[in-house]
């Protein structure tokens, strides 16, 4: 990451409210955002972007300020939608697994689908809707935890389930399914082709174990914690 980008991220972070700052830290956005930004052209003025599963719109709000884009959001949680509206984002309630997005076909240049896929038991409807509302040359940017991460491999080796969330939590509060690149490719193939894959570890660890993990992931990138996929519609 360049020093200029680091400065931009720190400046953005300093503008966040306390609740959004917690989300920023929990999601590792200091490292995730520069990767997301690398998928965008330098001039985004007037570009229409939809953030699916937008939550409190921390990422959408940053993208709106940083790129002066026309940003919308959809989510199933009314509390999140109220927080998003306070940021000036045009947001709509929708059940991502069964609902139809309230937008016409081909409405958006980009769709963000950040750390949402792993929360959906049946993501096919959501992916179909994303493909529908994207323009013919539109781009989906999707990030999700990586099933083949070093941490997950160690958990499986020790006989433990990588999906260690509380089963009584709401589905949208826990991970339901993890994907490797091949399974994500298969899931997406009905609507999208993957044009770029980026792996990263969003949460920096300064311990010797953390440094060792990052070195192994540098040698074998698919052992990183998160994968980001750039996808184009096949319509």
Image: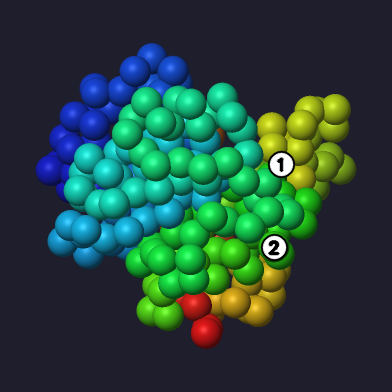
Q: Residue at x 24, y 23 (%)?
A: 15
Left or right side of 34 for 97: right
Residue carrying label 1 = 175
Helix, strand or loop status at disc 2: helix
In 3D space, how far apart are the residues under numbered discs 1 and 2 (Cα atoms)? 18 Å
In the rendered structure, which disc, 1 or 2, sits on the residue that comes first in sequence? Answer: 2
Percent x, y for residue 198? 44, 62
Disc 2 crowd rating (10 Å Cα; few below 14, some 14-19, many 20+) is some
Q: Nearer the viewer, residue 26 or 204?
A: 26
Disc number for residue 125: 2
Percent x, y for residue 65? 22, 40
Q: Residue at x 82, y 42 (%)?
A: 161
Disc number for residue 64: none
Mark 1 or 2, closer to the camera: 2
Hey, which residue is sitting farthest bottom in the picture? Answer: 235
Hey, which residue is sitting farthest top in the picture? Answer: 18
Percent x, y for residue 178? 70, 52
Say whether residue 7 is visible.
yes
Relative to 196, residue 123 above or below: above
Say whether residue 197 is visible.
no
């Amino acid at each position: 990451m360049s020093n200029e980008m680091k400065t931009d991220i720190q400046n953005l972070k300093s503008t966040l409210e306390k609740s959004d700052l917690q989300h920023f830290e929990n999601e590792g956005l200091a490292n995730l955002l520069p990767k997301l930004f690398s998928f965008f052209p330098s001039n985004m003025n007037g570009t229409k972007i939809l953030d699916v599963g937008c939550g409190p719109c921390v990422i959408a709000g940053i993208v709106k300020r940083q790129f002066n884009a026309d940003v919308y959001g959809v989510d199933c949680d009314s509390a999140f939608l109220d927080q998003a509206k306070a940021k000036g984002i045009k947001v709509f309630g929708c059940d991502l697994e069964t609902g139809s997005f309230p937008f016409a076909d081909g409405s958006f240049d980009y769709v963000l689908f950040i750390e949402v896929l792993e929360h959906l038991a049946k993501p096919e409807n959501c992916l179909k809707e994303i493909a529908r509302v994207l323009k013919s040359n539109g781009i989906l940017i999707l990030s999700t935890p990586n099933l083949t991460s070093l941490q997950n491999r160690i958990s499986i080796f020790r006989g433990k389930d990588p999906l260690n969330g509380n089963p009584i939590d709401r589905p949208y509060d826990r991970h339901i399914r993890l994907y490797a690149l091949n399974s994500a490719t298969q899931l997406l193939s009905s609507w999208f082709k993957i044009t770029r894959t980026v792996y990263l570890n969003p949460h920096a660890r300064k311990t010797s174990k953390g440094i060792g993990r990052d070195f192994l992931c540098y040698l074998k990138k698919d052992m990183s914690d998160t994968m980001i996929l750039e996808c184009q519609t096949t319509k």
